Image (cartoon, grey):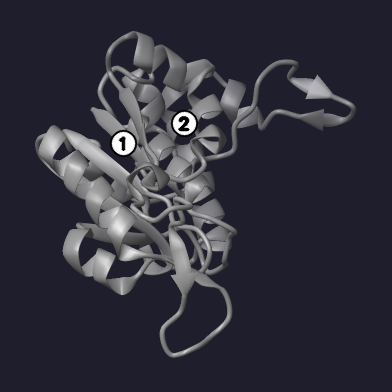
Amino acid sequence: MIYIFVTIFPNLIEPYFKDSILSRAIKDGLIDVKFYNPRDYATNKHKKVDDKLCGGGAGQLMTVQPLFDCLDDIIATYDSCHILFLSACGKKYVQNDAKRLATKETIVFVSSRYEGVDERVLERYAAEVFSIGSYVLTGGELPSLVLADSIARNINGVLGNDLSLKEESYNTDNMLEAPAFAKPLKYKGQSVIYGYISGDHQNIKNIKNQLSRQKTDYFSPEQ
């Protein structure tokens, strides 16, 4: 899997891949990460990538020329590019999207800034436009990382233990994961649920399924 981040602030994204699971995935050749900066493609004197909105309105908008040229270069360089834009106006990103996108060859994450990107960029290049929630951030770098992390977990070999992925929230009948405990069995008056340590594996499974359903009904009733 090749990840390509289109951003004017690559230093916000790069450090995330220096440690832990994603760093190991890169070393193992499961993920390759590239960065493209639209400023490098700007043809104006000051390498400016934004301008005022047509029709008025507050803020600036990322303009067409640097993004068109940047994305055209990426498409010419890499095969089968699946280009994603992150926007508060996009469709809600869910676990099934992560599973589906994990099968792609090359994913391009376009991280907008200011008031977003010129609509013509979306019309020309967007395979999909995602939102990670009903709120607004200062840029698309964090949402891009959210998608990149969640997709990577679904790439074969990244986690090292396929069971870890199978038992996570939203991966079992679209339910949230049951409560989890580790030793000590009792700490400051609070104990592990007795059924978890009964030794009866079928009973443990039944208890976890029941608690998973209760947790889902409480925290995510729409599931």
The quarter in which the C terminus is drawn is bottom left
Amino acid residing under circle 1: Ile
Residue in view at x 24 percent, y 56 percent: 68
The quarter in which the N terminus is drawn is top left
Question: Which residue occupies the foreground of this view, 181 or 142?
Answer: 142
Q: Is the residue 104 above or below the residue 132 in the image?
A: above
Q: Position of residue 217 (x, y in %)?
A: 51, 61
Per the image, the residue denoted by label 2 is 203
Question: Which residue occupies the foreground of this view, 104 or 8?
Answer: 8
Kindly give the residue lying farthest to the front in the view shown: 45
Sequence-first disc among 2 and 1: 1
Amino acid residing under circle 2: Asn
Residue 61 numbered mark, or none: none
Specify whether residue 169 is in view: no
Q: Quadrant of residue 169?
A: top left
Per the image, the residue denoted by label 1 is 4
